[in-house]
Amino acid sequence: MKMKKFLLVGLLGVVTLCGLSSCDDDDDGGYVPFSYAVGDMVVKDGSEPYIQLDSKQTLFPSNGSRLPNYLLKDGKRVIVNFSFLEGQREGYDYYILINDIDSVLVKNVIPITPETTDSIGNDPVNVLDMWTSDKYLTVQFEMRGLGREKHMINLVRNYSLSPNPDGDGYLQLELRHNRLNDPEIDHILWGVASFRLDDLKLENPDLKGLKIKVRSPYGTEVRTCDFEKEDSGEDAISGTQEKSVSTYVR
């Protein structure tokens, strides 16, 4: 199932995410009244704030001026729970009411070396979905733990790996999770994070996409994200759980 534009609420608190290109998924679509989306705040002097999705579509919130100050920063990455409103605001794709909003963890891709392997960690992490936009790789994931301490999630590059990009034009990276001192118990924690791709694309302008190695609870897997996939304009559904984004990861 290919995730593109909205995180849509389904039964039992299941929601969906938005993105441009989801990795290794098929298309499906539909709308429901209560929705989630991931995007960037657009805050300009003299204009009311709005949210731009990874698809470049825009959400104009009727209550945007009442958002917390820490979110009212241009380019701030957010996940938003919203309802569609009747009518339209000229110049915007959707008119919405924000029900809840939280910031999304944003990090750079970092190098991994023999000296930093232990601190970066390699504890299992279950990737629920993963997609690319022009600026980010965004990952929705879950891991086991008590939640007493924040876990650490990183996207890493091994510079000793050669050739990289590989012969097919894909840069090989790894998603790494460190549980740190949080007890590993049979309790699921949820998170979402975005990783900046600007430098990678500048360094490799002909890059076709990413191959991302993940140690999941079920074994090692490799996810392929193709930069050349085009948005078909359809809305798609993919499940995740509704939880606070910033509670469990850093």
Image (spheres, helix red, strand yellow):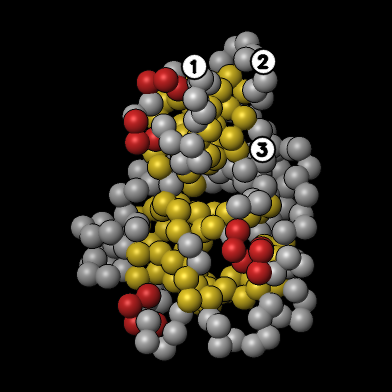
Circle 3/circle 1 CB separation < 8 Å: no
Image coords of residue 87 (percent x, y): 63, 11
Question: Relative to 159, is 104 above or below?
Answer: above
Distance CA(mark 3)–CA(mark 1):
19 Å
Q: Nearer the viewer, mark 1 or mark 2?
A: 2
Q: Which amino acid type is marked by label 3?
A: Lys
Image coords of residue 237 (percent x, y): 62, 41
Residue matched to label 2? 90
Question: Relative to 19, is 217 above or below?
Answer: below
Q: Nearer the viewer, residue 232 or 66?
A: 66
Circle 3/circle 2 CB separation < 8 Å: no
Question: Dot 2, crowdedness within 10 Å: few (<14), some or many (≥20)?
Answer: few
Residue matched to label 3? 56
Q: Which amino acid type is marked by label 1?
A: Ser
Which secondary structure, mark 1?
A: loop
Q: Nearer the viewer, residue 125 or 61?
A: 61
Image coords of residue 88 (percent x, y): 64, 14
Q: In percent of the image, x 66 and y 69: which residue is there?
A: 203
Distance CA(mark 3)–CA(mark 2):
16 Å
